[in-house]
Amino acid sequence: MSWWGKIIGGGFGFLMGGPLGALLGASFGHQFDKGISGLGDLDVGDPQRTQAAFFTACFSIMGHLAKADGHVSKAEISLAQQVMGQMNLDPEQRKAAIELFNQGKQDDFPLDEVLEQFRQECHRRRNLIQMFMEILISTAMADGKIDSAEKQVLLHIGGKLNFDQAQLEQLINMVSAQHSYAGPQSGQASLEDAYALLGVSSSASDAEVKKAYRRLMSQHHPDKLVSKGLPEEMIKLATEKTQEIKAAYEQIKASRK
């Protein structure tokens, strides 16, 4: 049974605890105010429990980040809806995701507590946490730019999840380049975008480019991420990222022939 099935099936009696449990419980309404069933027998670090934590933290912090500049833009709402669409959420899941997004917009949203519990639930799974950061960066870039308020929130989130400023800047550059390979503009990606996506300079050797490519493909491998706790519904996001990474690598290879 999936993490979602464990939440909605069976009796009451489990509460994940902490801010993530409170957020997820509230997203279902009062019928779940006594707890979320089915996950109580899963240890911290179990992929299904981690999937529930990822889903909860992802959509709530997306809402918090969207509000960082003082208002939530149509582009940011559209990005959240796009992520929901890519996940093929059923009506109940979509309703929960929207409620989590709205909870994240509240002034009293406990960001630091949510991040601390999320970090613990991920059990030091670095690639999973990086995927989480990439989704948040995409949220901030939904309107075409990252303003100073959003940047400060991203730096704060990154710091809580053990990303220093240089690592965050590299992730921002990578996600920005990925956008050039996504959707209608996929044919407009420049060679500069390709190098930025792989995180290497144009002076890198063929061996260095290949090493960077293999590392990124491994980090974003959909099956590996799901086994570590990425919600199965987000597998399409990971698959699209691997396609963008491959496209960038092929573009660099072609330019060097």
Image: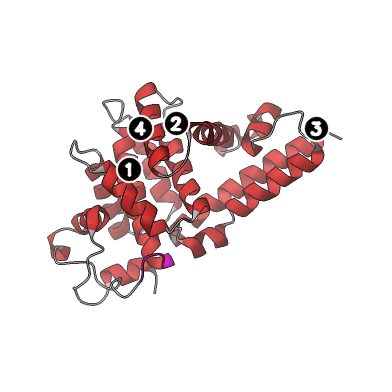
Q: Give the alpha-carbon distance from disc 2 to disc 4, as whole Å.
A: 13 Å
**In terms of sequence position, does the residue under pointer 3 or pointer 2 come before the other?**
2
Above or below residue 219? Residue 156 is above
How dense is the environment of label 3, judged by Cα within 10 Å: few (below 14), some, or many (20 and up)? few
Question: Mark 1 sits on what residue?
Answer: 61
Circle 3 is placed at which residue position?
A: 255
Helix, strand or loop at label 4? It is helix
Q: Earlier in the sequence, mark 3 or mark 4?
A: 4
State if disc 4 and disc 3 touch (CB < 8 Å). no
In terms of image quadrants, where is residue 93? bottom left
Which range is magenta? 43-47
Mark 1, Cα crowd under 10 Å, few <14 / some 14-19 / many 20+, is: many
Q: Name the quarter where the C terminus is drawn.
A: top right
CB under 8 Å between discs 2 and 4:
no
Separation of residues labelled 3 and 4 (CA atoms): 37 Å
Under circle 1, the secondary element is helix
